[in-house]
Amino acid sequence: METTIKKTTRSALPLHRSTRNMSVKNTLIYAVLIIFSVINVYPIIWMIINSFKSEKEFAVNQFGLPKTLVIDNYIEAWGTANLGVLFKNSIFICLLATILTVLIGALASYFLARIEFKFKNALYTFFIFGMLIPIHATLVPMFILLKNLGLLNNPITLLFPYIAFHLPITIFILTSFMKAFPKDIEESAIIDGCGIFRIFWSIILPMSRPALATVIILNFIYNWNEFSFALVLLNDPALQTLPLGLASFAGQFTVNYGAQMAGLTMSMIPIIIFYLFLEKEIVNGMTAGAVKG
Amino acid sequence: MQLTGKSKAALIIGLLPAFLIYTVFAIYPIIQSFYYSFMEWDGFSEMEFIGLQNFGNLFQDELFWNSVGNNIFVVIASVFGQIPIALFIALLLNRKIKGLKIFRTIGFLPVVLSTVVISLTWSLIYNTKDGMINEILRAVGLDFLAQNWLGDTKWSMVAVCITVIWQFVGLYLIIFLAALQNIPEEVMEAAKMDGASEWVTTWKITIPMIWDTIIVAIILCISGSLRTFDLIYVMTHGGPSHSTDVMALYMFNETFSNLKYGYGSAISVFIFFFSLILIGIVKKVLGQKFI
Amino acid sequence: MKKLGILVLGLLLLFSLTACSGGKEKASGDGKITELTVWNDWTENRPEYKVYKDIIAKFNEENKDSIHVKIESIPHDQYETKLRTQAAGKQLPDMFRVWPGARIAPLVEGNALLPLNEILDTWEGKIPEGIMKDYAVDGKQYAIPANISETSLIYYHKDAVKKAGFEEFPKTYDELKDLIKALNDEKVTPIALGNKAIWPLQSVYISTIGDRFTGSEFLPNTLSGKSSFTDENFVKALSVVEELAKLKAFNEDFNTIDEAQSRTLFNSGEAAMHFAGSWAIGPILEGVDNIDNIGVAPFPSFSGEGDTEKISGAAGGGIALNAELSGKKKEAAFKFLEYFYGDELYQGLAKSNIVVPVQVEMDDSIPEIYQTANGFAQGGLAPVYDATLTPELTDMINNGLQSITIGEKTPKELAEEMQKENEQGKK
């Protein structure tokens, strides 16, 4: 962060503009950004505030601050939905699926982006087709397939659909990113005596950081919020994931909004932590890009 | 890079895991689903082969075409809403201003939110009686502009689309930012030295340099919008009066509520090829070597 | 990058370890115990679900050497999706909750259910024939009802009705309309309705209104082709919904809020009336401040051809058995059903304010609105539309009624559309 600020001051110097002009412009920019931020952040604040209201208060006062902080919602959410187990399952599946998807996808993207071989374009097209598949159409066939393979109700059941359906977007983003690297990278590496996988691991992967961060975040979010496959493919309560547990708060005849909000607030925390963590990677990627250029 | 004999093995090792898992768990099920589209099947009883009859019925199904129309509306709104807004904000954020990190984090927040929260909050914001929008309109004396946003077929689709745009702007914002930050600083510095105005720099240098990313984003946006399901499912159930029904939702209802597996599968086939054609057209128009 | 990798690996290791240890604990079955899985939608924190679960726990305790019933709960809105996927893969659980009438028909047709006729004696004379038949297809019984869902009751705030000038709750539709107008003049929302999920106007309103206009034989006759949805009386019934919407009888946002949300509107006193089924008794008792102020009434008479006493309702809470059960498992499942649908269940449910199909003793601790509502079931039940119509027709009338309320469709158009589907569906 420090370096960026320094750079800004340096590059701003040669532009002989009046400071007043600059500050009007900056104010405008900040105004736009602040409006954008308020619009974005409002529902989250709304959710957190309402998670502390009793059901009766929620009914009459949806927009104001809670009169008293009710933490019963959190206790109920944690207890009823067995959130502890759900959290554990969700984190396990999300991390494993995300890592595997990105790893397998990055490897495939590397070959698809950097290496000439027969049927390369056909194979790429084949992968990209996956982005057009409406996943709800595959619920029943997927169930039957996993049943025949004896893979239902297993801690790793969800890995298969999650990896398979997110490979296309992963490959799509990574391939387009990797294609943009200058051609002589591998050539000099080969002269240095590096093998293909060595080039992939030590040169291409580090260079792809910003794109990797993007696909990691995307994969994690998709997997974290995925509902339909988790619903259909898992029966054992000990294996279920977070979105399923949260759904059990909202029924046909009664809706316990408070507990639902509390559960949702808690479920949002890991993903925000995960995002903040990766954001650093994106920033690093930025500097890496600057060095490269 | 050209392959030498030895690296053929590397090629297979590198591509096989992705190819296998994708073919078995994504392609095979959808082919299976394509197969059901020639069947009459309620999910319980024996299947019956009926050839193209499902497709014949589909093309005469007014409610289906209604969902296609609505879906195209979502696609257009998403492409022309999400992409420009995301790009604009990304360009503002790329000026290395103070607080960049906070703005970026906040910008991305909606993407990580669960659909349930989004739909609940926005339903309340749109509520006709005491929702935020109508309250504000009434407070400033614009009562006549207050609408039953989600309950009126004239407005429901617009209201839903605004929520869809809101939900995904952050995603493209991050993608654009990652691309913008990858533009070598020297290029921008050089432009500034030459005295080019910011406007010119943006249009002549920045945008062309991330053009590939923009196209990637547009295609992601189209393929995503054509499969929109969750948000509308929770927010309006496709109503009122089918005014917010989209293809994936219609397929889901036909399959699981009306027990028409075969017919539902025919809709999936349609969605698949429809997406393919639409993206093909976009590619032609914008000219990128995609696919 | 490296740090991230190590962190992730560490986490994974941790989780895989805990996952493994969790798995081992569970392996307790030693082969002698017959395990039965029962699927249901008892995910929410509701008293009647606790009754169900407690009885199963007690059953497990009493039979701990031979049978264990495992409860797997799936959120209501997703229950059918899951059940249908599972059925398509021929992987139905041993026992599962089913809904009556048209909703079990496809399961029966697909030979997925085991008839219970050999153990029916247990309930002979206890549960009336007319209620049992909701879970029967072609003379075979597939589940035992635990409760009765009356779908059309009117809950009202006594003071609000009185203030609008009515000493007594309206007995006829014309009086009801006057009441609605009077309430509107007083700036009180007349009826709280949440029709976002589109079933309430059909299940709650049309089931009984339709019956009042057409009589109870109309639906079965029409489905078998003896009469038609374009019948003038049926169109009149649909027109009632149109008229109510035009009278501004509902809260403005009725098409965009849930059924449960509309109930909070009623509970808070913002709306004077709420049309809902017997499932609303519990939430209303819990949600209003002064329960003595709440009255419950049957739908008014519409001077049609139907019986003016009847209200619509259907059996509920049935658990069906997988057709593939045999030998020890089948015996165990029968034993479970005989135990489950016993006096304890019905008494427990009555205490949770659920209307039950058997006679239970009532004392003063039982709230008045429950006793009144329970009494209405004695007049006989009219068919509930979504328990009788095919899924396609249900979907059509659900959507159609919504369209009628916003002026996108006329009652006559909907009736014609339904008749067209009815004729096509039979082909």
Image: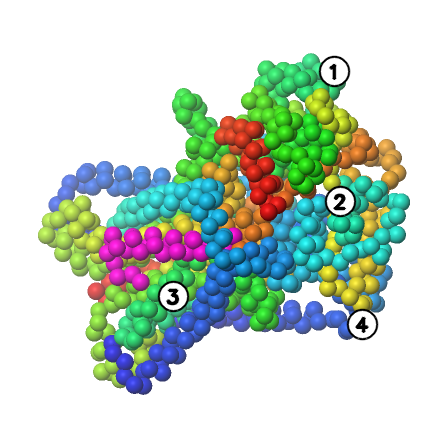
**Looking at the image, is mark 1 or mark 2 earlier in the sequence?**
2
Tell me residue C344's x, y (percent). Answer: 85, 48
Q: Is residue A8 placed above or below C223 in the rendered structure?
A: below
Mark 3 and mark 1 residues within 8 Å of each other at the beta carbon: no
* Numbered range of the magenta stretch: B263-291
Residue bearing mark 4: C32
Q: For mark 2, name the chain.
A: C
Q: Gap between marks 1 and 2, in whole Å?
A: 38 Å
Instruction: Kindly indicate the quadrant of the structure image that contains residue C307.
Output: top right
In the picture, the disc for residue A157 is none
Residue bearing mark 2: C134
Report the predominant secondary structure element of the magenta stretch: helix
Give me the residue at 67% from left, 57% from top: C110
Of A97 and B282, nearer the camera is: B282
Local crowd size for mark 4, using a 10 Å CA cut-off: few (<14), some (14–19), many (≥20): few
Q: Nearer the viewer, mark 2 or mark 4?
A: 2
Tell me residue A258's x, y (percent). Answer: 59, 42
Q: Nearer the viewer, mark 1 or mark 2?
A: 2
Q: Amino acid at mark 4?
A: Lys
**Looking at the image, is mark 2 or mark 4 earlier in the sequence?**
4
Left or right of C37 on screen, residue B232: left
**Looking at the image, is mark 1 or mark 4 earlier in the sequence?**
4
Mark 1 and mark 4 residues within 8 Å of each other at the beta carbon: no
In the picture, the disc for residue C167 is 1
Left or right of C12 on screen, residue B272: left
Q: Is residue B248 placed above or below A239 in the rendered structure?
A: above
Q: Residue furthest top?
A: C165
Q: Is residue B266 magenta?
A: yes
Q: Gap between marks 3 and 1, in whole Å?
A: 72 Å
